[in-house]
């Protein structure tokens, strides 16, 4: 977005934060219960050091300035990922924000930071193996799922990827198994409320069968 306007890359990240605010408001207004944003992947450390440093400062500023507003709007805030690489101040602010907003019911806003789907799976497998040594070589989905980063959240209904890319880029590999995918050429800084509603409209046209046939869905009792 910034490159097209002959602006430094960091300008795009600043504008992207405005989009975060906008989409959080959209979710609140439309009754969406969970929003998970892929803010910084475990691969993003490979970007130029100047850009990474700016992103860390932007993250810090957002934690300092946005949490009170989220709390006022009854938004629960949480961060998932390997936080060990962030500096102490960022980790402290994350912990405070999570405690402050823990009981807020309007929307759960999850920020995936230094997160990777493969990292999540490896952690979950290892944790499950430690918790159930008697099941070595025979762990099942129900044994592994509780150890995933988003174990306490429902699996996503809709995945939105902006910027014209048509891949999930190591995001929520386990959780997206039956998620509806939506791709748009719009870049994240220009993703508007109208664009968000278009994604929701597309989702409403989908038939979610979860392995069953259309006929089975019609015959199933309501809510099953």
Image: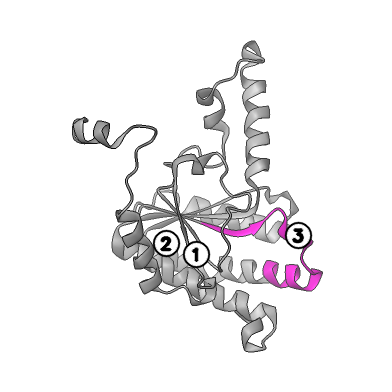
Q: Quadrant of residue 5?
A: bottom right
Q: Nearer the viewer, residue 84 or 221?
A: 221
Label 3–label 2 contact, CB within 8 A = no
Q: Is residue 84 above or below residue 209?
A: below
The N terminus sits in image quarter: bottom right
Q: Quadrant of residue 70 in the image?
A: bottom left
72 and 146: which is toward the camera: 146
For this orientation, the residue located farthest to the top is: 134
Residue at the extreme right: 49
Q: How many marks?
A: 3
Residue behind mark 2: 71
- The local secondary structure at tag 2 comes to helix
Residue segment shown in magenta: 37-56
Q: Secondary structure at mark 1?
A: helix
The reply to whether the magenta stretch includes residue 138 is no
The dot on residue 45 is 3
Disc 1: which residue: 67
Could you tell whether 115 is left or right of 25 in the image? right
List x then y, in percent, for residue 83: 68, 50
Q: Which mark is residue 83?
A: none
At x 38%, y 63%, the residue is: 199
Alpha-carbon span between mark 3 and mark 1? 25 Å
Q: Nearer the viewer, residue 128 or 158?
A: 158
**Crowdedness near tag 2: few (<14), some (14–19) or many (≥20) residues, C-alpha within 10 Å:** some
Query: Element at badge 3?
Result: helix
Residue at (69% x, 66% y) in the render: 56
């Amino acid at each position: 977005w910034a490159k097209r306007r002959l602006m430094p890359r960091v300008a795009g990240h600043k504008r992207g934060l405005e989009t975060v605010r906008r989409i959080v408001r959209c979710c609140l207004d439309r009754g969406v219960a969970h929003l998970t944003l892929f803010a910084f992947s475990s691969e993003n450390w490979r970007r130029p050091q100047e850009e990474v440093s700016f992103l860390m400062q932007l993250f810090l500023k957002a934690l300092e300035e946005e949490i009170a507003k989220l709390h006022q709007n009854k938004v629960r805030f949480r961060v998932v990922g390997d936080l060990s690489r962030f500096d102490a101040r960022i980790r402290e602010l994350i912990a405070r924000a999570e405690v402050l907003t823990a009981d807020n019911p309007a929307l759960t806003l999850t920020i995936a930071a230094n997160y990777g789907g493969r990292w999540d799976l490896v952690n979950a497998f290892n944790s499950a193996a430690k918790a159930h040594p008697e099941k070595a070589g025979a762990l099942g989905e129900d044994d592994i799922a509780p150890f995933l980063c988003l174990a306490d959240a429902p699996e996503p209904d809709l995945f939105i990827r902006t910027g014209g890319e048509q891949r999930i880029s190591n995001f929520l590999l386990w959780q997206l198994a039956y998620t509806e995918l939506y791709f748009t050429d719009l870049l994240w800084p220009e993703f508007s409320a109208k664009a968000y509603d278009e994604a929701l409209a597309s989702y409403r046209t989908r038939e979610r069968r979860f392995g069953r046939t259309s006929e089975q869905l019609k015959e199933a009792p309501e809510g099953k």
